[in-house]
Structure formats: C-alpha cells, structure tokens
Amino acid sequence: MDLLENNLREHVRVLSSEIGERNMDRYENLQAAGHYIVETLRGLGYSVEFQPYLVEGKDVRNLIATHPARRLSEETIIVGAHYDSIVGSPGADDNASGVSGLLELARLFSRRPNSKALKFIAFTNEEPPYFQTREMGSRVYARWAKEQGEKIVAMICLEMIGYYRDRRGSQQYPPGLGFFYSDTGNFISIVGHLRYRGLLRKIKVAFQEHSTLPVESIAGIGLIPGVDFSDHASFWREGFPAVMITDTAFYRNPHYHSASDTFETLDYQRMAEVVKGLYHVLNSLDQ
C-alpha cells in the first residue's frame, strides 16, 4: 500500500470510526473532526483560518487553508468538502472520504508553487436539517465570497469518493439517464452545470489523462435529482463555476445515510486514483 492510499484510509478511519457521527446532535464530535482537520493541515505547513457563525446558539466553523499564488494573481481555485455527517451515521463515504481527499491534495500541493491562489476548505453543516439553507457552511462561504468580490475561477466539491463495485447492475440513475451510462459502479463522476460545461470538459480531459479510474460526466440543471445535492450548488447560486466529484452517493452506495457507512466498506486504492487524477486537474487549472 502506498503512502497516499494509507493516508486516505487513516483519515477516514479517524473521522468515521475514532470520532464517529459528527453533527449538531454530536457537537463535541463535530468539534473534534474540525480539530483533526486543522491539525492535519497545520502539520503540512498551512495556516488555517476560521469562518465562524452561530447555529442554534452554538459556534460552528468553516476551515480554510490557503496556498498563496507565487505571483500576483486575484484568481482563486477552491477544493471543498463537508466534514459533518448525517444524524445516525459515522459518515465514512459521506463525507470522510471527501475530506480525506481534500487533506491529501493539500499535502501534495504543500510544497508545490502555484500561479493562482488555492484554497482547501472544509465546510460544516452540509447535511440536513441545514442542507440548502442559509446555515449550510458552503452557503455562508459562497455568500461572503460574492460580497468580497473573490474571483473564484473553479470550485471542486469532493462529495463521497470512496465506494465502488464491479458488479453489473450496481449503478443506478435518475429516470432516463441509465440509457447513456454504465450500469457498473466502478467509475467516478464529474457533475457540473450547463452554464459551466467548459470547466467540466477541461476537468474531465485532465483527469482521464492522469488516472486509470473510469470517469463519467454530466452537465445538467437542478431538475435532475442529485445534481445539486452538495456544496458546489452553493457556488452555482452565487454565480461561481463549480463541479462535484462523486461516486454518485445513493445511486450506488447502499450504506448511504445509514449506520453501516463505515470505513471498512470503502475502496482506498480507487480513492487514491481519484486524488491522483485531481492533482493533475488542479495543475491544469492553475495554468
């Protein structure tokens, strides 16, 4: 097992097994998950900024690590993932897997100079009852970025990247889409908006050039169930180009939003291929 694969496994183990369910009902665990993320990023040499806000009288925080541009540039690329889990679930795939990918991408870029500012953001409160409300962490950040005039040229949301199956019939789709895609759940998916399909195409090409993992893509609108079911949609709402990288969640993973979403169910070798592909995607977007 290589370093990347081992690190991904360990991040998911700590977040989903050692810490476990993490949300406002398990507030101490939510805080512990944030602490783990912050200390991991600091250990890589990053300074971490907090974006705090109040929910139900309690302090919650988005966690922001910035890799500054090597030369003067106002453009920003964001990699984001939510670190809370649904009530009743340890949240290994949803979304310790996405956070682990974010942390490993931060590690890979920690000593690499980049032309654009690169932000790694762990968002809080993505799950219900805050999903698609003003108290969702990514909504808080995206509104702030719009108010500040931040020039976000790409936001990549990591939303469940760890569950794969090679059995025919293991992949489901919204009505009508199954005719166009594989029925085997062995790929990663890139989900974008029609408005930003150019970004989606660029990401898909760069990913395919540098990863052995099959990749599918769709540029749609919110009418397709699941297309806007994560933090990327908060950025769409404010007019920023964004995509979601996902194993398709409930269209594939039978453990979705359940107590059985544990770290033993994930495929860390394929997760490593996702991270390798995204490393080169970020390199291409940084040009």
Image (spheres, rainbow, N blue to C red):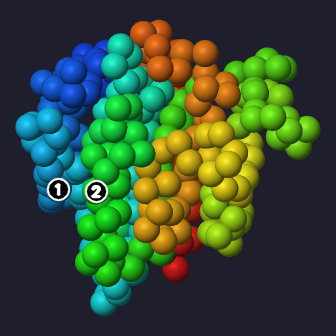
Tell me if I can see residue 192 in this picture: yes
Residue toward you, 76 or 228 = 228
Side of 96 relative to 222 (left or right): left
Tell me if residue 27 comes above or below residue 220 in the rendering: above
**Residue at 36% in and 67% down:** 118
Side of 29 relative to 144 (left or right): left
Q: Amino acid at mark 1?
A: Gln
Q: Residues within 10 Å of mark 1 (few under 14, many from 20)?
A: some
Tell me if I can see residue 8 in this picture: no
Residue under label 1: 51
Q: Position of residue 127 (x, y in %)?
A: 38, 34
> At numbered mark 2, what does the secondary structure look like: helix, strand or loop?
helix
Residue under label 2: 140
Between the C-alphas of marks 2 and 1, the distance is: 9 Å
Q: Position of residue 123 (x, y in %)?
A: 31, 47
Q: Amino acid at mark 2?
A: Val
Q: Position of residue 115 (x, y in %)?
A: 40, 80
Based on the displayed image, in which of its 4 quarters is residue 187 positioned? top right
Side of 164 relative to 280 (left or right): right
Q: Residues within 10 Å of mark 2 (few under 14, many from 20)?
A: many
Residue toward you, 148 or 66 = 148
Based on the displayed image, in which of its 4 quarters is residue 214 positioned? top right
- Kindly check if marks 2 and 1 are in contact, taking CB atoms under 8 A apart as contact: yes
